[in-house]
Amino acid sequence: MTGTGAIARVGDRIIEYRATAGEKTRILGHLNAEREQIEGDIESVEPGYLLKYKDFSTVADRSPNLYTIRTVGGVTADIEANDFNKSAYLERVLDNDAGRFERVGRLQHIHEKDSGGNPYDFLAYMIPGTTGTGPPRGYYPMDNRILLTPISDAVYTMRLWYIKHYADMKP
């Protein structure tokens, strides 16, 4: 249901409703707060229920090892910016059919470091053993992109898990 539809339904049920801008704002604010409460209730009863994933593939020898996740072929993907920034974890898919995955560590903070040119080289210093090339062992989400370390030495299928939050209703 859209925000306009929700407002119309409230107007049908409340005789005193005058459809002013202030009343519309209050109604939508209340409905959006209830949606957030329901999402929280779902997570407390069934943790992981709102988890969704997006698969993507790495490119061998890409430097920086940076991937745009929210757009695919110029088309906006199904991951909203708010959901992407609250990514839960990242896995390397070893064998999807057998359910074999390898967790990739999330980097929490970026500290400035003189990397000698490439501004993304600092990641190699943040996780021991990630210099050079190899399968991804660390990641850092940045806006609508994700940065992996070390540089991929082959094509790997990655699975980004995130918590799906539903968008606020708007008029």
Image (tube, grey):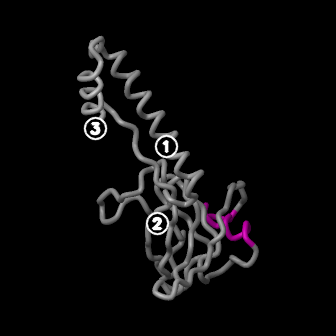
* Mark 2, secondary structure of its residue: strand
The picture quadrant where one finds residue 47 is: bottom right
Determine crowd level at label 2: few under 14, some 14-19, many 20+ residues with C-alpha closer than 10 A: some
**Residue in view at x 52 percent, y 50 percent:** 42
Q: Nearer the viewer, residue 158 or 98?
A: 98
Whichever of callouts 3 and 2 sits on the residue coming sooner in the sequence is: 3
The answer to whether residue 141 is seen in the rendering is: no
Q: Disc 3 designates what residue? A: 2
Q: Dots 3 and 2: beta carbons under 8 Å? A: no
Whichever of callouts 2 and 1 sits on the residue coming sooner in the sequence is: 1
Whichever of callouts 1 and 3 sits on the residue coming sooner in the sequence is: 3
Query: Which amino acid, mark 3?
Result: Thr
Determine crowd level at label 1: few under 14, some 14-19, many 20+ residues with C-alpha closer than 10 A: few
Quick check: 98 left or right of 78? right
The percent position of residue 126, horizontal first and vertical second, equals 73, 66
The percent position of residue 88, horizontal first and vertical second, equals 58, 60
Whether the magenta-drawn stretch holds residue 164 is answered as no
The percent position of residue 129, horizontal first and vertical second, equals 73, 78
Q: How far, Cα to Cα, is label 2 from label 1?
A: 21 Å
Query: Which amino acid, mark 1?
Result: Ile
Query: Closer to us: mark 3 or mark 2?
Result: 3
**Residue in view at x 46 percent, y 49 percent:** 165
Q: Disc 1 designates what residue? A: 38
Outermost residue on the right side: it is 128
Query: Closer to us: mark 2 or mark 1?
Result: 1
**Above or below: residue 158 compared with residue 144:** below
Q: How far, Cα to Cα, is label 3 from label 2?
A: 25 Å
Q: Disc 2 designates what residue? A: 53
Quick check: 129 left or right of 3? right
- Quadrant assignment for the C terminus: top left
**Residue in view at x 59 percent, y 65 percent:** 89
